[in-house]
Image (cartoon, rainbow, N blue to C red):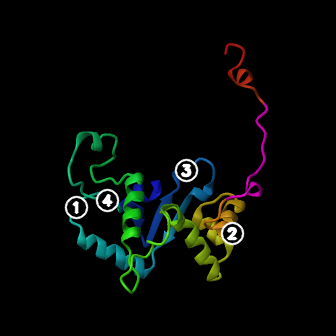
Amino acid sequence: RQEICNLRHTDYRDGYLFVIRDKVSGDSDMAFIKIRITPELEEIRRRALKLDDTASPFLIHRKPNRERREWMEGKPHWTYVNPQYLSKAFELARDAARDKNGHTRYAQLTAAQRPTFHEIRGLGARLYRSRGIAESAIQALMTHANQRTTQIYLERGREALTNEDYLTVSAPLSVRELLGPKG
């Protein structure tokens, strides 16, 4: 969510979207990717630009209904969409989605069973794999430094993680040892 909200118009250039995964940018070169924009995505981008006359440096943005100081403080721009707002807007759109018969698409599912914004990543990974895309390419697209992380997205989907999914590590130092002699 954070990277989606932080994408700027300047990150789109020469037919690519340049993305830095803030979460892992200090850990891996995998955090720096450029994604080729397909003609279909370019058309969606152009249509979205025509619909919106709000001057914003961000690709994903919104004009707030009301401008309250406490909502604006800490934002990089008054049109910036907070990640929490993006998730909530996704939930509202998901819950309003209807099937071809006009029925609410997810009404039969409990709130916990309904897909979240974050689950788009896992779904996308599984769809790419089903189309024959190499797992190394999926790993790069997801900016996972570790292939094991990609495997969890590919194999688990919405299933709960099991004990076997976790890497066992040790943290043998006591708090006193971590603080040192003056602690």
Instruction: Report the residue at 41% width, 52% height from top.
Output: 84
Classified by dominant secondary structure, the portion drawn in magenta counts as: loop
Label 3 to label 1, Cα distance in Å? 29 Å
Q: Is residue 96 above or below residue 73?
A: below
- Taking the image as shown, residue 11 lies to the left or right of residue 115, namely left
Magenta stretch holds residue 45: no
- SS state under label 4: loop
Q: Which residue is mark 1?
A: 54
Q: Position of residue 37 (x, y in %)?
A: 45, 74
Q: Which quarter of the picture shows residue 62?
A: bottom left
Q: Residue at x 45, y 79 (%)?
A: 38
Amino acid type shown at disc 1: Thr
Q: Which span of residues is magenta-colored?
A: 161-172
Which residue in the protein does label 4 denote?
A: 61
**Sequence-first disc among 2 and 1:** 1
Q: Quadrant of the C terminus?
A: top right
Give the CA distance from mark 3 to mark 4: 21 Å
